[in-house]
Image: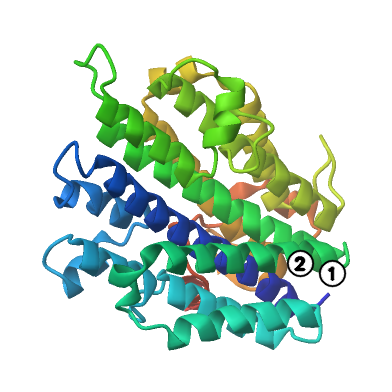
Amino acid sequence: MLSRVAESMFWMSRYIERAENTARFLDVNFHLLLDLDKITEVDSRTYWEPLIMVTDDRERFLTLHTDFTAQAVSDFLVFNRQNPNSVFSCIALARENARSVIETIASEMWEQINRLYHFLNTADPTILQRDPYNFYRELKNGSHLFQGITDATFSRGEAWDFVQAGRYLERADNTSRLVDVKYHLLINPNKEEIDPIDNIQWMAVLKSCSALEAFRKVYLSRIEPETVLQYLVLDRQFPRTIYFCVAMLQEALWRISGSRRRDFSTNADRLVGKLEAELNYTTIDDIYQLGLHTWLEDLQKKLARIGDQVYQTYFSYHTFQDSEDVVLAPGSRSNALSSGNVKVSRAVWSQSDSSQQQQQQQQ
C-alpha cells in the first residue's frame, strides 16, 4: 500500500471523528442549557469557554473574538474556516483526503462525505440560533452514516486498519480532553453532596461521550464524579472510553505491522503496547495519587507521540539529525526499540501541522 494512500485514510478517519465529536459537544451543551434555564444563569462564559478549551483553540479564538458568547463559540467551532478544527474545516479536509484516494474507498463512502460537505457548505450560519437541534442531529447522523457505510462496504485490509487507527487515536484524545476540562470545572472538594445542577452537568459529560445509558447499566446508583471518571477512563467494553480506544488502536497498528505481544516491529507498536499495559493495570487511586490533570496531560502526550511515530513509520521516510544520522526504517526492530534515535515533538493536532513539522525537522 502506498504511504500516500495510508496517510489519507488515516487522516480522513481522524477528521470525521473530530467533526462528529465537536458537533456532539455542542449539541449536548445546547440541551444542557435548556435543562438549566429555569435553575441558574446560563448566559455566562462558564458554559461556553470549556468547549474551546476541549479543542485546545483558546488562543486562536481570542484572536477573532473578545468574549465567549453562545454565538461566537458556536460559529467558531462549526463554520469558521480560519479554524482548522471547526466542523466545516474537518469535513472539508476529510473530503479532500477521501477525494485523493477515491479509487480505494467505496463509492458510497465518497457520496456520503461529499453530501455532508455540501450540506455544511450551503447551510446558513444563522441556523445555529434558529434550529440548532436539527442542525446538530444532521451533522451527527451524517458522520455516523459515513462510519456505518465504511464498516459495511470497506474491505478489511491495511486501508481499513489505518481507518481504525485514525478513528480510535482521535477518539481517545477527545475523551481525555473532555474529562480533563469538565472534571476540574465540576469537582468541588469542599462540597459534601452533589446538588441538582451538578447532577445535570455530570449527565451532560456522559452524554458528550454518548455514554449515559451505558453508564446507567453499570452503575445503578446516583451519578458520582469518581464513577464517571472510572467509566470514561478505564471501562473495557464501551467504545468511547480511553482504555477501549487505546486497545482498539493497538489492535489496528499491530495488524498493520504484524506485531504481537513481546515481539513488536515498530516504535508505534511499542508505545501503544506500553500505554495499553499501563491502562490495564491502572486504578482510579493511582490516577488520583498522581493528580488527574497531570495524568491526563501525560496521556495526551503519549497519544501524540504514538501519532508521531505512525507518521514516521508509515507516511514519511526522512533522515533525522541527532548525535549521529539515523534513518528510521519501517520494519526495523532495532530502530523501533531505540526511542533515543527519534526526536519526540509536540502534539500534532492536524494533518497540516504534521506536514509542517516534518519539513522543519528536515531543515
At label 2, counting other C-alpha atoms closer than 10 Å, the crowd grade (few under 14, some 14-19, many 20 or more) is many
Residue drawn at x 52%, y 72% as measured from the top left:
351
Q: What residue is drawn where x is 28% and y is 69%?
A: 129
- Tell me which corner region of the image, top left, top right, bottom left or bottom right, holds residue 4: bottom right
Q: As drawn, is 159 to the left or to the right of 236?
A: right
Say which of 54 and 31 sits in front. Answer: 31
SS for callout 1: helix
Identify the disc placed on residue 227.
none
Circles 1 and 2, Cβ within 8 Å, touching? The answer is yes
Q: Residue furthest front?
A: 38
Residue 248 left/right relative to 19: right
The residue nearer to you, when weighing 19 against 248, is 19
Q: Amino acid at mark 1?
A: Thr
- Classed neighbour count for the residue bearing mark 1: other residues with Cα under 10 Å, few (<14), some (14–19), many (≥20): few
x, y percent for residue 341: 60, 54
Q: How is the image coloured?
A: rainbow
Q: Quadrant of residue 327?
A: bottom right
The disc placed on residue 150 is 2
How many angstroms separate mark 1 from mark 2 (CA)?
5 Å
On the image, numbered disc 1 is attached to which residue?
153
Image: 73 above or below 188:
below
Q: Where is residue 112 shown, x and y percent of the image?
A: 67, 78
Q: Position of residue 302 (x, y in %)?
A: 53, 45
Compared to residue 241, the image places residue 187 above or below, namely above
Left or right for 15, reference 44: right
Q: Amino acid type of disc 2? A: Thr
Q: Is residue 43 above or below residue 84?
A: above
- Quarter holding the N terminus is bottom right
31 or 23: nearer the viewer? 31
Provide the secondary structure element on which disc 2 rests: helix
Quadrant of residue 74 in the image? bottom left
